[in-house]
Amino acid sequence: MKSFFALLLASASLFAATPNVGIVDDQEIFKKYAKATDLQAEIRKSEESAQASVNERIKAVEQLQTELQGVDKRGQDPMLSENGKKAVAAEFQQKNATFQQRRAELQTFVNEARNAIQQRVGEMNKQIVADARVQAEKVAKAKGLNLIIGKAPVLFSDASLDVTEDVIKELNATYKASASVAVPTITTAPVAPVPAAGDKPAAK
């Protein structure tokens, strides 16, 4: 009997020491947190702008390639004089140098644009996680929770443990309050023209 009661007391002590746990679905936060959706929309606009610039540069490179092929074809004319061949060869060399330069600049632009977007995504993720951590702590204190963990690594959790909506509610309330404090400024700045081939992408 003593061993039974000892086991019962040990089990009760273990249960009492078990922390009150909450679960947060980070994917839902990225979908429903207004700040996250706003930042994602801004990043999509940056991606579209970068892609438009890339497309313009691709057209320019393709045009140079077409011109280069035309010069090469003229250089193969058997009726061309020696002086004519030399002139065509010089023109081909010049256009080929320009073509190679523009193609290298295009690749550099693509790499820089991709890196800039990836950096912005990384910064956004850090901001959202930091905001969620602050509001999760607030929810935990309000609900008497000792621990809040992300849903992703959890294989199973009871729905009663999910506090995602509570955290999202606090996130949106705080974001809305901070946005209402800012005084909007209306500007009529002209739209920046598409940079010429070879320019580096503007910092977003």
Image: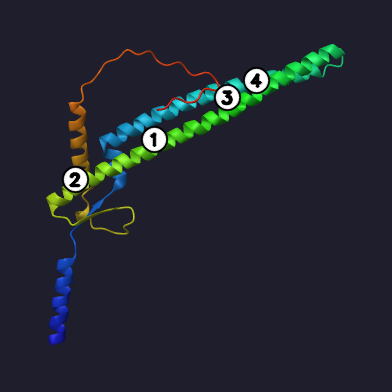
Quadrant holding the C terminus = top left
Quadrant holding the N terminus = bottom left
First in sequence, mark 1 or 3: give its number: 3
Amino acid at dot 4: Leu
Residue at the image point whose x is 33% and y is 33% from the top: 39
Residue at the image point whose x is 43% and y is 34% from the top: 117
Q: Secondary structure at mark 2?
A: helix
Q: Residue 70's spot in the image, x, y percent?
A: 73, 18
Q: How is the image coloured?
A: rainbow
Q: Residue 64's spot in the image, x, y percent?
A: 65, 20
First in sequence, mark 4 or 1: give its number: 4
Residue 120's disc is 1
Residue 58's disc is 3
Question: Nearer the viewer's eye, disc 1 or disc 3?
Answer: 1
Q: Residue 185's spot in the image, x, y percent?
A: 25, 18
**Mark 1 burial class by Cα count in 10 Å: few <14, some 14-19, many 20+:** some
Q: Secondary structure at mark 3?
A: helix
Residue 166's disc is 2
First in sequence, mark 2 or 4: give its number: 4
Q: Secondary structure at mark 4?
A: helix
The answer to whether mark 1 and mark 2 are in CB contact below 8 A is no
Amino acid at dot 2: Asp
Amino acid at dot 1: Arg
Q: Secondary structure at mark 1?
A: helix
13 displayed left or right of 110: left
Residue 31 in which image quadrant = top left
Residue 64's disc is 4
Q: CA distance from mark 4 to mark 1?
A: 33 Å
Amino acid at dot 3: Ile
First in sequence, mark 4 or 3: give its number: 3
